[in-house]
Amino acid sequence: MELEISQFFELASIDTIGRTALGEEFNSQNKENHDFRNSYARLAEIFAYRLSNPWFLSSSLFSLSSKKHEQRNSQHLMHEYVNDLIQKKKVELNEKDKSTINGCRDEGCSYQKPKYLIEILLANEHQVTHKEMKDELITIISAGHETTAKENSLIIFMLAHHQDVQQNVYQETNSIFSDGDFNRSPTYEDLQKMEYLERVIKETMRLYPAIPFVHRQVQNEMMIGKYLIPADTIITIPIYCLHLNPKYYKDPDQFNPDNFLPDVCRSRHPFAYIPFSGGTRNCIGMKYAMLQMKTAISTLVRSYRFSPSKKCPTPKDLKLSCTIALEFSNGCYVKIEPRS
Ligand code: HEM
């Protein structure tokens, strides 16, 4: 069967972030309407439209455009969605017993289960305003779902186009899940053992960083190499180009997970690889993302074999564009067969 996989990963990633960060079953994979997802996608498109028509970066000019109205509607839907979620969780928590937030949720259990982000925020309601709580949740749901969904699609795509690498990933999972318990969910310890898969994930993020560009405003005048950068300049850091620099990567266009062997990593400049950005405002979800991607990919590879689709016979046929994150211009197609 040939499938456009990115749409499935997007819904699965929203469900995952819902369950792990919010303790909420979004159940997006079984729904027709996706208010949060659709509003988010529309806002990203409008943002990209403003970047490519820079006169609309001026708020007063943009407020005259029809897209301003659309932006307001999408923002409203997104905010309503999260408001409803906060209200629902408040009721649920009051019904249970707020005291269990700081301890165990199950009767008789002797260990402390991790708390969901929304529970932590609600337990600190006197310190966090409703708006702060809403903004925090929107940021986590948005930043946490799209990036991992894009990367998961790209990892499967690369495995489909590199059968030898896919076979190695399969063998590694085989060595972790013995015959009797092949279908169980991976534990945290299992995920730590997936060293080869980790290299595959990192190499995919090198060639296709989900966030290809980040921006910074320079506070004080400074020199970068021989260039003087005046204060207040906004500079773009092209992660995508940096990862293809032949100064740091031999054959930079080739997909080669060995670029992430420990010795090779040690010999490279630490900032030659920054899919999660760097410095004080880097990604706060990078550890979570790695666990999520390892869980998703190892689970899929255990049961399915992936190969190139006729719609996208070589990696060069994959057409990408960019809003805030990488976008698939014509989808991300692969062929999927069950292993048994
Ligand atoms: C493969 C997956 C991911 C990639 C490639 C990625 C990439 C990035 C990048 C490049 C930035 C920095 C943006 C900048 O410097 O302007 C960032 C920031 C951020 N990411 Fe991620 N991210 C991923 C997954 C996640 C996940 C799963 C979460 C949450 C659960 C998350 C939450 C955030 C947040 C909240 C920020 C803003 C941090 C701040 O401004 O202080 N990300 N991410």
Image: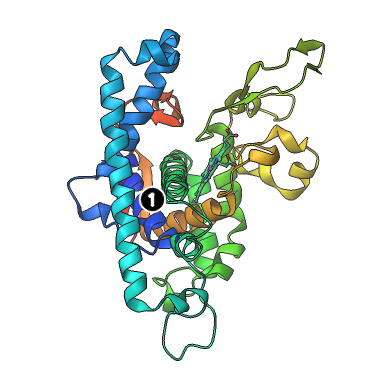
Give the percent coordinates (x, y) of residue 304: 35, 55
In the image, farthest residue toward the front: 126
Which residue is at the front of the view, 225 or 157? 225
> Within the displayed image, which quadrant is ligand 1 positioned in?
top right
Q: Where on the picture, by quarter, is residue 218? A: top right
Give the percent coordinates (x, y) of residue 199: 61, 48
The C terminus is located in which quarter?
bottom left
The number of numbered discs placed on residues in the rendered structure image is: 1
Indicate left or right for 109 with 330 as reference: right
Give the percent coordinates (x, y) of residue 220: 76, 21
Which residue type carries mark 1? Ser
Q: Where on the picture, by quarter, is residue 217? A: top right
The N terminus is located in which quarter?
top left
Q: Is residue 39 above or below residue 59?
A: below
Residue topped by disc 1: 13
Residue at horizontal 33 percent and vertical 43 percent from the top? 79
Label 1 neighbourhood size at 10 Å, few (<14), some (14-19), many (20+)? many
